[in-house]
Image (cartoon, grey):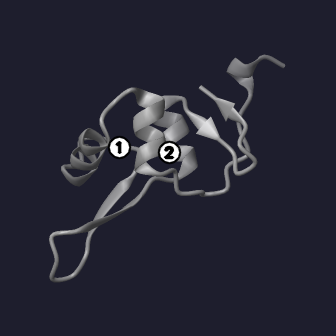
Amino acid sequence: MSLKNHIPHFTGRNVTIGEIAKASGKDPQFIRIGLQKGILKFGYAFRKDNSHEYNYYCPDKQVWEQLGYFKDEAGDENG
């Protein structure tokens, strides 16, 4: 089976902003702002109550669907 037809085993793991930035070659702040504005579609930015800070959730399946990047919890990369 070729990698092109291989669908990874998704766990819902939250892919970190740093990991996404490294895989995409973008600055982490670019990723954060894109998620906050809803421009990037591979995750969610949640603003904390009474704060200017955000929490981010980027499920592994959405990151793979949008960017083609996947790394399982054991550390195997694809993309």
Q: Is residue 49 left or right of residue 75?
A: left
Identify residue for label 1: 41
Question: Which is nearer the eye, 1 or 50?
Answer: 50
Query: Which residue is outermost to the right?
Result: 1
Q: Residue at x 22, y 68 (%)?
A: 53
For label 1, the crowd category at 10 Å Cα-Cα, with few meaning under 14, some 14 to 19 and many 20 or more, is some
Question: Which is nearer the eye, 4 or 36?
Answer: 36
Residue 29: numbered disc: none
Q: Are marks 1 and 2 in contact (CB under 8 Å)?
A: yes
Where residue 1 sits: x, y (%)?
84, 19
Task: Indicate the quadrant where residue 24 lies.
Answer: top left
Considering only vertical position in the picture, is 33 above or below 44? above
Q: Residue at x 52, y 36 (%)?
A: 65
Residue type at mark 1 is Lys
Q: Residue at x 61, y 37 (%)?
A: 70
Quadrant where the C terminus sits is top right
Residue type at mark 2 is Gln
Question: Which is nearer the eye, 62 or 14?
Answer: 14
Q: Residue at x 68, y 19 (%)?
A: 4
Residue 62: numbered disc: 2
Considering only vertical position in the picture, is 50 above or below 4? below
Where residue 2 sits: x, y (%)?
78, 16
Q: Is residue 79 left or right of residue 29?
A: right
Secondary structure type for disc 1: loop
Where residue 35 sits: x, y (%)?
28, 49
Secondary structure type for disc 2: helix
